[in-house]
Amino acid sequence: MRAVIQRVSKASVIIEGSEKSKIGNGLLVFLGIEDNDNDDDIKWLANKIFQLRVFNDSEGIMNLSLGDINGEIIIVSQFTLHAKTKKGNRPSYIKAAKPDKAIPLYNRFIKYFHDVSGIHPGTGEFGAMMDVHLVNNGPVTIIIDTRNKE
């Protein structure tokens, strides 16, 4: 699994002109799922995101987690995070999981995140054309890949 995590002061997901999700202070997470991802990836990544200390404390140091600030989160599926661009100019998405595998993993990720954090994540809609609006606070953007646990 690959996640692009953005600290936001607000974010929303619009689908066909209707607002699907909206948050204030928190995290917007774009989540890409590969064929070989599994429940171990879900657990590791969800815990990492929830415990990630990217919010400022009273001294302006990034020392607080989403739970510490009572923040909100939106998790949006995004297969394009697994684009391969080595050859040519048209990305290949061969590593991205197909919907029959990706949708159940996406749904389990959302459920596990809620179970571990107590936060009910906002979402996008798998496979839909979405307009994602955000104000990246900082800016702070972090990329985490369960295949490369740095």
Image (tube, rainbow, N blue to C red):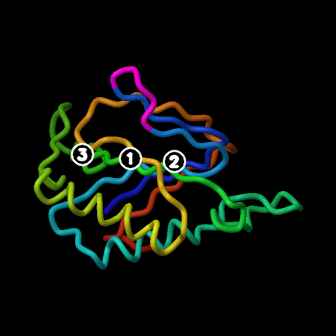
Foreground pick, 7 / 147: 7
| Magenta span main SS | strand
Displayed quadrant of residue 33: bottom left
Counting from the top left corner in percent of width and height, residue 26 is at: 62, 51
- Above or below, 70 relative to 17: below
Q: Residues within 10 Å of mark 3 (few under 14, many from 20)?
A: some
Who comes first in sequence, dot 3 or dot 2? 2
Q: Which residue type carries mark 1?
A: Val
What's the mark number on residue 49? none
Q: Residues within 10 Å of mark 2 (few under 14, many from 20)?
A: many
Give the side of residue 85 with respect to residue 78, left or right.
Answer: left
What residue would you read off at disc 1? Answer: 76
Identify which residue is drawn at 36% across, 28% down.
15
Residue under label 2, please give it. Answer: 28
Write the start and end of the magenta stretch as one range: 16-20
Left or right, residue 89 beside residue 141 = left
